[in-house]
Amino acid sequence: MSSPTAGGAAAEPGKLVPPGATLGVLGGGQLGRMFVHAAQQMGYFTAVLDPDADSPAGRASHHHVHADYGDVDALARLAGLSDAITTEFENVPAAALEHLAVARPVAPDAAAVAIAQDRIREKAHFARCGVECAPYAVIETAQQLEAVPADLLPGILKTARLGYDGKGQRRVSTRAELATAWEDAAGLPCVLEKLLPLDFECSVVLARSEDGQMVHFPPQRNLHRDGVLAVTEVHADNMPAATARRAVAAARSIAEGLSYVGVLCVEFFVLADGALVVNEMAPRPHNSGHWTLDACDVSQFELQVRTLAGLPLNPPRQHSVAIMLNLLGDLWFVDGASEARAPHWADVLALPGTHLHLYGKAEARRGRKMGHLNITGDDIEAVRGTADFAAALLGLPIPLSE
């Protein structure tokens, strides 16, 4: 099945790509799957390129190009199928996006993705935008390691590239621990970030169009466990209003500084004294924005479709308070089970306001993102009560709040 225009003349950036055309995506994971669902709901055909022959997005898409992201022939096939192309995660090679952009509109562009792939470049961009991050030092050489200021310890050593969900990160308290951690990282370029007194974490998901129009969702309050997002809570009082305004302004400045096109998530730390510092950005929809699927009139994935296709951006409206629970593969192994057993979904879905989203992954593994559960309602206390009950049924730690 193909669209009427796929393989024809390349659409120009900023031009409307109407429903009935084909939208392509690099990456076949859950974010790609939800993008595909949103695009298909709006009348688009879809094409996915992913090295996994059984990828969740590939199984849901009209076309699945089974190949590595650096395969030039496969990229040409994706371009031939698609009228515009996006990415579902930031670790696709920026060179692949550059290659595709010769033939088709690509959003976000390779330059923005390349900055998000490298913590050193990312922090430099934050500074250019006037957005404060935690004090840090770049460590690329033994000389830089020796010159690290003492007041940056204790801190967190993070590899500059390919780190997400807590991967490539290690807490260090002394110079000896720092040296060992850098050696264990094989001497790769790293940043050492000073540990700061944290009150809570939050994030902002926004969308920016080619012509500079920008919309955003309400800032989200997030709880991480072992470096992985566990809970997101969104309602009018989830953080001080001034903090929310500062977070939105900072995220907009970061997007504007990139001339960004697409959906962008910016994550922040809120410190004990109320100060706001940026952590990192993700040039795509984000785990912390999954609540928008059930609590808003427009989801983050529909905004991804709209920015890619050049459609108008309407400010999203939150119609329900929401809590999102991340569902990892560990839930399939509760009570010491050696073989995977699906949770009791019927019991969970008997609770009011519950919305289950599973990602179509064939095998449950510990630590693997298998899905999420959104709980919506009119009253945050009632939604919290339902979320705690659902967590207990699933075997998640409770209470859910910090």
Image: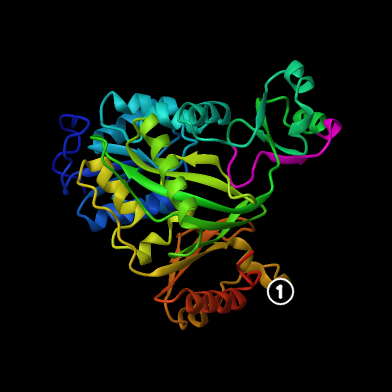
Nearest to the observer: residue 103 or residue 153: 153
Residue situated in front as seen by the camera: 92 or 140: 140
Q: Residue furthest top?
A: 143
Res 375 visible: yes
Within the magenta stretch, is there residue 171?
A: yes
| In the image: residue 141, left or right of residue 162 | right
Q: Locate residue 196: give its quadrant.
A: top right
Residue 2, how many percent across, how many down? 20, 45
Where on the picture, by quarter, is residue 391?
A: bottom right
Q: Label 1: which residue?
A: 335
In percent of width and height, residue 90 lies at 47, 37
Left or right placement of residue 219 versus residue 172 in this view: left
Q: Position of residue 273 (x, y in %)?
A: 63, 49
| Helix, strand or loop for disc 1 | helix
Compared with 34, 152 (above or below) is above
x then y, percent, for residue 261: 32, 36
In the rendered image, which quarter contains the C terminus? bottom right
Seen in the image, is 151 located left or right of residue 226? right
Q: Is residue 25 left or right of residue 359?
A: left
Q: Which residues are magenta?
A: 163-177
Relative depth, front residue between 241 and 351: 241
Amino acid residing under circle 1: Asp
Reply above or below: 317 against 377. above
Foreground pick, 271 / 355: 271
